[in-house]
């Protein structure tokens, strides 16, 4: 199955040359890392708003065989934990193959995951990560997982299945949680709330993150993917996290009364 892009030409340029030029404009000061990174939180808005943060965050990751990408379900389509285990994802820069071996291992080990394409068809949260990955890394595969559940136990089980699958298949992997932060509040309010969530992310505290988001009414769309990612990386031996960058859409639009926050975090 070929999953075709749905936000090409909207969230990022739709042509190869224009997309490469756009990416290169955003990666000018980004130096590729050789340090092993187990996980990351990376934003998924239009490149004009969050592209700089995404480029900087993903540049901190050394090459791996497979990127397991947890994204939130914005559309409401499909199952509550949707994985694709075969096929390719298309972007203007070419096709990215799904790591069928690792994805199938996850599916076999976790009863909460379901083979499902519907959740992915109109969802942008995983798609927008791919052009940056294609720009930086020439030979990699992905495991795409779209999450609509808020059940902490399920999210942790899904994350642990990712770690178990990586151990079983022997691939080198980085696990990405695709997420923006607070939506449509003032820059001051967004920063105050997002600092609370970022504190939990840096502490590798998935349960604490979920509680903080709930108790403080933080509209972080990818908190559930982040919980799953944190469960996975801790199983893989993660011990520390670093904030790469925090910004908001007002830096581009000039409107600081209604911003979306963006955080880039890497976990080692």
Image (cartoon, grey):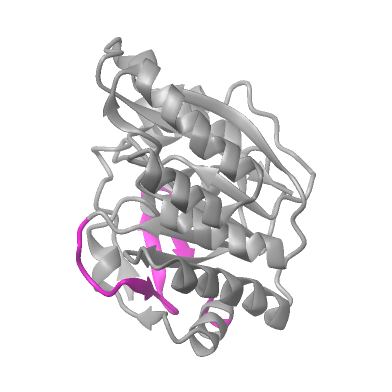
Answer yes or no: is residue 22 visible. Answer: no
Residue occupying image coordinates x 39% and y 16%: 188
Question: Could you say which is closer to the camera, residue 224 or residue 44?
Answer: 224
Question: Could you say which is closer to the camera, residue 97 or residue 199?
Answer: 199
Would you say 18 lies left or right of 122 here? Answer: right
Would you say 263 lies left or right of 45 here? Answer: right
Q: Compared with residue 121, is residue 260 higher up or lower down, i.e. above or below? A: above
Farthest front residue?
Answer: 215
Residue 191, given in percent of the width and then of the height, sits at 44, 23
The answer to if 99 sits in the magenta stretch is yes
Q: Which residues are magenta?
A: 75-101
Residue 125, given in percent of the width and then of the height, sits at 36, 51
Residue 167, given in percent of the width and then of the height, sits at 72, 77
Farthest bottom residue?
Answer: 108
Residue occupying image coordinates x 44% and y 79%: 85
In the rendered image, which quarter is residue 79 located in? bottom left
Q: Compared with residue 55, is residue 36 higher up or lower down, i.e. above or below? A: below
Would you say 102 lies left or right of 4 here? Answer: right
Residue occupying image coordinates x 38% and y 25%: 190
In the rendered image, which quarter is residue 119 located in? bottom left
Farthest top residue?
Answer: 254
Placement of the N terminus among the 4 image quadrants? bottom left
Q: Compared with residue 263, is residue 93 higher up or lower down, i.e. above or below? A: below
The answer to if 123 sits in the magenta stretch is no
Answer yes or no: is residue 18 visible. Answer: yes
The number of discs equals 0
Q: Compared with residue 100, is residue 204 higher up or lower down, i.e. above or below? A: above
Residue 204, given in percent of the width and then of the height, sits at 64, 50
């Amino acid at each position: 199955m070929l999953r075709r892009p749905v936000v090409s030409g909207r969230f990022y340029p739709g042509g190869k040359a224009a997309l490469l030029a756009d990416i290169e404009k955003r990666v000018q000061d980004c130096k590729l890392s050789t340090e092993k990174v187990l996980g990351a939180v990376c934003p998924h808005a239009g490149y004009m708003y969050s592209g700089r943060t995404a480029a900087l965050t993903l540049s901190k990751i050394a090459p791996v065989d497979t990127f397991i990408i947890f994204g939130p379900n914005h559309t409401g389509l499909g199952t509550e934990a949707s994985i694709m285990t075969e096929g390719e994802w298309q972007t203007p820069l070419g096709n990215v193959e799904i790591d069928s071996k690792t994805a199938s291992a996850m599916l076999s080990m976790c009863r909460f995951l379901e083979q499902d394409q519907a959740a992915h068809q109109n969802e942008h949260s995983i798609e927008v990560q791919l052009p940056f990955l294609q720009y930086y890394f020439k030979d990699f595969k992905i495991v795409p997982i779209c999450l609509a559940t808020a059940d902490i136990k399920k999210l942790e089980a899904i994350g642990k299945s990712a770690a178990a699958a990586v151990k079983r298949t022997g691939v080198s992997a980085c696990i990405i949680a695709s997420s923006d932060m607070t939506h449509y509040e003032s820059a001051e309010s967004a920063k105050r709330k997002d600092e609370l969530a970022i504190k939990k992310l840096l502490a590798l505290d998935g349960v604490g993150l979920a509680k903080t988001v709930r108790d403080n009414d933080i509209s972080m769309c990818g908190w559930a993917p982040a919980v799953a990612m944190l469960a996975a990386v801790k199983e893989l031996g993660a011990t520390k996290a670093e904030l790469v960058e925090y910004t908001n859409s007002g830096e581009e639009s000039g409107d600081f009364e209604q911003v979306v926050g963006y955080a880039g975090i890497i976990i080692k």
